[in-house]
Amino acid sequence: MSSPVWHPFTQHGLGEPIPQIASASGAWLSCDDGSRLLDCISSWWVITHGHCEPRIAAAIAEQAATLDQVIFAGYTHPQAEALARSLVALAPAGLDHVFFSDSGSTAVEVALKMALGHWHNRGEARHRILVLEHGYHGDTIGTMSVGARGVFNRAYEPLLFDVQTVPFPVAGQEKASLDALESFCRAADKPAAFIVEPLVLGAGGMLFYPPEVLRAFSEICAQHDVLFIVDEVMTGWGRTGTLFACEQARVEPDILCLAKGLTGGSVPLAATLASAAIFESHRSMDRAAMFFHSSSFTANPVCCAAANANLAIWQEEDVPGRISALGHALDEGLASLAGHRRLHDARRIGAIAAIDILVPDGGYLSDVALRLRAYALANGLLLRPLGNTIYLMPPYCTTRAEIAQAFAVIADAVDTLPD
Ligand SMILES: *Cc1c(COP(=O)(O)O)cnc(C)c1O
């Protein structure tokens, strides 16, 4: 009997096999037929330290037996209080308030609503959001609106709200990007906010840009009193080599979005951090000015306990050392592909490595990605190329030997592509 499950980003009509994963440990997934897969993409960018990290698993078990869930409107609990304090201490200066939700998309929706509510409560009519070309911020209607338009959202396009798009800062053409931002900010009809993924545009194809540009973005926004929203849903928790990508540019955004690796990737939790000014514009004696947002599982205690365990690991173990060793292994892997006639633009930041395949017809739906995915699966790798971009974003526990093995399979996979 066929399964009733409808999978995300899956064309069921193609009839691709859908492996059944029974368990996981470290960088490995075990399938129910006994085979194993090296999780080269951290199960869609969420697992940081490794699967079933013992300290996080223990914290989840203990909390599940103590306090499983409680309404968070008007009530609180120790795990959320401790987590919020720790996040404020770790985040860039000026982010003094923490709003919890449960996915990257909701963290961004909350950020957008906070920004719009801020101007509304101050009596300024500002509704325009500035976005960065090729950006991705989630799959809800609001987050699709601030992300790149394409085949993913064509069906919904008439309902997506209008934004103004700042060109991606292509190397050598950064000025065009900064000038566009400046002119959008100078407009008489002032924008409410500018939202970016810092240093790496993930779903847009692992596109990197330098800290100086991120810093210039934030300076332009500050000069023109436009809120600067940084979406660290993917880049947070060490992915770019530092705890947050913002640190590399010494940027202090007005709003910061976290999810994915917040719990080490074990259970879903998100946080939107906001400045005192944004919190204050919602705080008054007027109930109509409160922040009207919640979800059933806001600040779920089990998820907060997992996040606190993740923070303890960051505090007590040499996570940056592991990321740096993994970075070297990724560099060696990319170097092993150097000179390959079909590969170009090898790049790496922190624990993310990417390389592009030369194909006549790139783009997300290019069947190169499908072929590579199938080859990788048959050879023990979980890989999910983005169109013609192959990338590795492994858990930090992945060893040098495992990375070398992954790159050997990738080289073979690319060789098997038809000309
Ligand atoms: C994955 C991602 C999101 C969406 O997160 P979900 O938890 O999948 O909703 C938002 N922003 C960025 C930058 C992401 O990479």
Image (tube, rainbow, N blue to C red):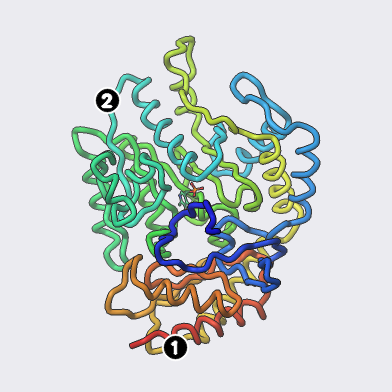
Q: Residues within 10 Å of mark 1 (few under 14, many from 20)?
A: few
315 over 410 or under it: above or below: above
Q: Residue at x 43, y 22 (%)?
A: 281
Residue 341 falls in which quadrant of the image? bottom left
337 over 326 or under it: above or below: below
Q: Residue at x 67, y 59 (%)?
A: 49
Residue 350 shows up from this direction: no
Q: Nearer the viewer, residue 93 or 205?
A: 205
* Secondary-structure class at tag 1: helix
Q: Residue at x 51, y 81 (%)?
A: 410
* Secondary-structure class at tag 2: loop
Amino acid type, label 2: Ala
From the top left corner, tell me how far across and down residue 63 is, in percent. 77, 38
363 over 371 or under it: above or below: above
* Quadrant, the N terminus: bottom right
Name the residue tied to disc 2: 125
